[in-house]
Image (cartoon, grey):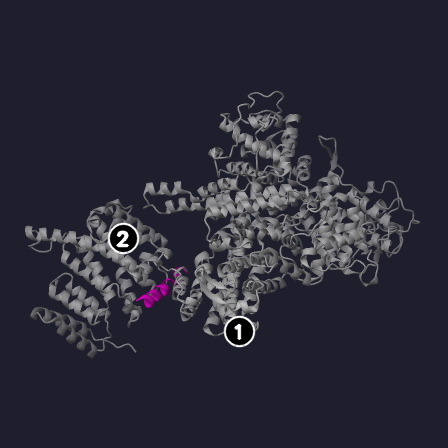
Amino acid sequence: MAVTVHPSTWDGVIELTKSAQDRGSDPLMWAIQLSSNLNAAGVSMPSIEVANLLVSHICWANNVPITWKFLEKALTVRIVPPMLVLALLSTRVIPRRRSYPAAYRLYMELLKRYAFSLASLVNGPNYQKIMESIDAVLHLSPMFDLQVCEAGFLVVGFVLSTVWQLLDASLDEEGLLELTPEKKSWWPTRTQDMEIDNKDSFEEKRTERHEEMRKINAVMAIEIIGDFFKDKVISRILFLARRNMPVHWGCFVERLRLLAANSSALRSSKNITPEVLLQLASDSRRVLSRECKTSSQQQFHAMMASGSLVSSAGQCHGASRSALWLPIDLFLEDTMDGSQVTATSAAETLTGLVKALQAVNHTTWQDTFLGLWIAALQLVQRERDTSEGPIPRLDTCLCLLLSITTLAIVNIIEEEENALNDEAECSPMTPTSQIKEKQVSRKRRKDLISSLQQLDDYEGLLTPPLPVSSVANQAAAKAMMFLSGLAVGNGYLDDVSLNDMPVNCTGNMRHLIVEACIARNLLDTSSYLWPGYVRSRSNQIPRSVSGQIPGWSSLVKGSPLTPPMVTALVSTPASSLAEIEKIYEIAVNGSNDEKISAATILCGASFTRGWNIQEHSVQFITALLSPPVPADCSGFKTDLINYAPFLNVLLVGISSVDAVQIFSLHGLVPQLAAALMPICEVFGSCAPNVSWTLNTGEEISSHAVFSNAFTLLLKLWRFDQPPLENVMGDVAPVGSHLTPEYLLLVRNSLLASSGNSPKDENKSKRVSRLFNPSSTEPIFLDCFPKLKRWYRQHQACIASTLSGLVPGTPVHQIVEGLLNMMFRKINRGGQPLTPTTSGSSTSSVSVSEDSSLRLKLPAWDILEAVPFVLDAALTACAHGRLSPRELATGLKDLADYLPASLAAIVSYFSAEVTRGVWKPAFMNGTDWPSPAANLSMVEQQIKKILAATGVDVPSLAAGGTSPTTLPLPLAALVSLTITYKLDRVSERFLNLVGPALSNLAVGCPWPCMPIMVSLWAQKVKRWSDYLVFSASRAVFYHNTDAVVQLLRVCFTTTLGLNSSSISSNGGVGDLLGHGFGSHFCGGISPVAPGILYLRVHRAVRNVMFLTEEIVSLLMHSVKDIANSGLPTEKLEKLKKTKHGMRYGQVSLAAAVTRVKLAAALGASLVWISGGLCLVQSLIKETLPSWFISVHGSDPDGGESGGMVAMLGGYALAYFAVLSGTFAWGVDSTSPASQRRPSILGTHLEFLASALDGKISLGCNRATWRAYVSGFVSLMVACTPAWMLEVDGDILKRLSKGLRQWNEEELALALLGISGVGAMGAAAEMIIESLS
């Protein structure tokens, strides 16, 4: 209960003090009497009120030695709180220090005696009230923008303000405040009144004595500043201010540098020098460091908490330097999957991945860039001789190396340089010379140059694939001509035939990489001067070449688009933004013929192989698909129809399967989908009454334009995914079903947030000046009623059987018209194929030659009727009224009439397969095509592909039933596809059906997939190896045990645990091998397990079980690494040697390296398999469940078991942090990071609750302790930005638990990086633990 103190008590304090002052009483007796009086009055001590009274009494009416002695004695016996007295004196003494130098000296003596004793403040009475009073005196909250006035916060502010006041006073003493941007102090450093103290103020002797004391005081103040930085408690508190109050700290440090550079008092000091002062202020190595105090974990912390594999990477072959970048290898290889379509840019994803690995591995940016280049080059080498298939891979592979990888590096370098620029803009006090110094430094750019120069040591990776060797030679020739004095920018190289090239112009992949970097302003032509970049100079470079063909340089100079030039530009990619901009300008402003020629060029080599400018090409193409509405057009529909030939050229130009992947890699799928939807809506609503003749002589109708746009749109939202995911209730693979609504949502979100972040501003600076989105308004599916209606019908078809066809309706008439068109050559006595209840002649269309002419209907109307047509045709085939051959022929006629109907065919047949109501079709070669000719060979090849995995391949004749049956809808779909000729026209439509057919066959019972593959292998023998490899996926689709076995092989192969020796090979080379190809052993050979998993993981219907399996495999791998196949008796040996700690015969450092490699592999597999959702499930659910569950006792229950348990805990920590960084990033630049606070907070709440004893754990205690300390250590060292998002109370509880484990430094480091919310608690912990 608070005691009310009578006002007379305070009057008594002053009266007692004056009386003692007049009598010259002993200060101790005065203090005893004062303490007795205050106790009698019920005043709690130390007293805030008494402190105010005493300081006010001294300043300045009683500024005499006796009163200062009274004050000092009151401090000694704790009558007044020392820190409050120091705060009160600072506001009174420092401004009047010139008039009262002795008082200033006494103030500093009190500082030296009491300012370093913060523990007595924190642990003493009235702590919160005292800090609130100090806040009121110094105005700390408004000064430092402290939103929370907790005592710990105010302690940090008080310490910083105390040092800052001394700093500003020192600057003011020497007139240096005028050199600061503000030209004044942040604190009162001089009085506003005239300094006339008394009649003796101007006496000569007194003035000389004052001046001498002022000089002494100036030196003393600076030395005290140095003492503050030397003190282990104060220095750590100042570091808290440095980390959590960057703006204020920046201003403080700039003033400190100004003092160091100009202060004569500092230079005259015998105790400190300017260099030492600056070093003390900038030294963070001894502040909030990770020092382990538990001897049993010192080496583990040294190797694990740093997150680096570098120190021990060379100790075993399997965990070589490249293993640091294993996740990049896996990501790039997974991105090569042609069936994968994403709504986000691969460059953005790769940027986040590289930043995560650099942070966790603690590598330099030079090593990071080198690891990235090597991983991308290894991808190219794996694709040098891959088996031919329907999906070309080399162009995509080179796109990843030369475009996506380069753009990721652009993002990383721009991030650093823009941060430096922003720092300069936000810190007006920064000297101009220092700003220039920072801008010139550009360390990441220099590290990029060093990494590219270092690439020359990897000649085996630089050999270009044969199709691009000529391009590499051109790049080398460009550098050679530059060094020979020819202007490269004059387009000379465009017009020179390869036959005219100097003989010695042999280029490699590094030449292509450098050109890609130069095109994006990462390098300049000085890179041509690198040692060894140009092998030799040629004096025989032709100065004039006869018969030059016009090229890009001619276009830029203004030459018209003649047919020879168009042909040349279509086959030759543009090399610069200026060239591609010129074509875009023609496509926008040229004549109709010029626009079509420009569109043809834009979709040619510049799109597929223009890796230096590809990001601009895809943007321009997307923009051209949404042409502006001219003023003389009546509406949007009329405008689009007038652009039909132009739009068709663009649509056909980007219809190849690899074209869709290029848009996906560059993250433009949402924008492309939004551009295609209006085209589909308009042309699908037009009857094919009008046609257009192209320059090639081909005639197109609205149906053709619609079909090209519609099939392309369907490829963008994973239309090929089987509806089994919707019907069976299994968890769908993450990333499937990029629905139209989702794509529009992403597009609208990107537009709404555009320019709101520094990253968006950086990207906008790189975009061409000509690029201007046609629409920035949000678009929704409701804007396209016809498309929406078809989409809802598509969903209904998947969900349930067809119904609702009413005889006599327009839809029924269209159905009969289509059936008559499809089967007009079949005479069935006029019996209609449509199911009808009326039987009246008005409900059927008679078979006539003009039946197709009567179907001049809009495409949307036809698509609405197609499912009913297919139902009738399939029913007729099942009942024998149509032969399989007639069914296939009719389907082909329908697809030829309206290619877009293939979408409805795929949708309907896929849905009917999953319903399982149709009788099987016997693939006997009579009714249906037979796979017998090569089915057994396919089976053997599948077994050979999976030979290294230990997975059993089901026999094709299992169970005694005939293996040559397919579900009737699947048989019909297969039969339809093999009727197509493989030409450029049919390719763009087969690219829609092919993936759907493959996914559908994979989901059907074994051996449907091998049967389908056998039929297609008979048709296209050169695709045989590719098709058989695709068929191997089906083994895993139906058998989760096979998936687990494949994962197990991935771990053992990567870690080199297939042999009993710890030095066996492993790493990326064994995991991914040489890709897939038949060129190594004269035929199909076993495929590396990593390649196999990356091709089959999307066929796993329920990915959620993978997290538990991967955690289990990780822990088993830790045991295998520790055991390494050694006998049990050898495992008991745990000894110290001069080479460090050894576990059995296995070096602990080597074992830890492999443990980290296993964790990196596990994190990569979780992230790649399930993306953000699976990672969040791992951290939120799987890991807590694992720790709660009982996993049995340690092996042998001895020390060896404890070491294995500890290794397992660190493995899980590394695994969890890596998984989080992959999914969320290390900072807050990615959209996924917005979900991080919730999931991470939940996980840390679990850790804190378990440490509090609120949750009972079932795992080994050593594993738990290693996990918690390892997880927190990695976050402190690698992901400090995460901690800023976590609730401060959770962090305090977690820190408290760590302190109970004697992890003082780790607990302090955790709070120290956790932002302003935990700064107060961190300061109090520093004071309590170090005082």
Question: Farthest residue in the right direction?
Answer: 829
Q: CA distance from mark 1 to mark 2?
A: 64 Å
State whether residue 1058 is above or below residue 1077: below
- Residue 574: x and y in percent read 58, 33
Q: Which mark is residue 8?
A: none
Check if residue 1315 falls in the magenta segment. Answer: yes
SS category of the residue bearing label 1? helix
Residue 957 picture quarter: bottom right
State whether residue 1266 is above or below residue 487: below
Residue 1041 picture quarter: bottom right
Q: What is the crowding at mark 1: few (fewer than 14 residues within 10 Å), some, or many (at least 20)?
A: few
Check if residue 1079 falls in the magenta segment. Answer: no
Residue highlighted by disc 2 = 186
Q: Say which of 1172 and 182 sits in front.
A: 1172
Viewer can see residue 666:
no
Amino acid, disc 1: Gly
State whether residue 759 is above or below residue 1146: above
Q: Disc 1 or disc 2, which is closer to the eye? A: 1
- Residue 927: x and y in percent read 87, 51
Q: What is the crowding at mark 2: few (fewer than 14 residues within 10 Å), some, or many (at least 20)?
A: some
Viewer can see residue 364:
yes
- For the C terminus, give its image quadrant: bottom left
Q: Say which of 308 and 879 sits in front.
A: 308
SS category of the residue bearing label 2? loop
Q: Which residues are magenta?
A: 1314-1331
Amino acid, disc 2: Trp
Residue highlighted by disc 1 = 1197
Q: Is residue 847 left or right of residue 9?
A: right
- Residue 95: x and y in percent read 19, 55
First reached walking from the N terminus: tag 1 or tag 2: 2
Q: Say which of 694 and 528 sits in front.
A: 528
Q: Main secondary structure of the magenta part?
A: helix
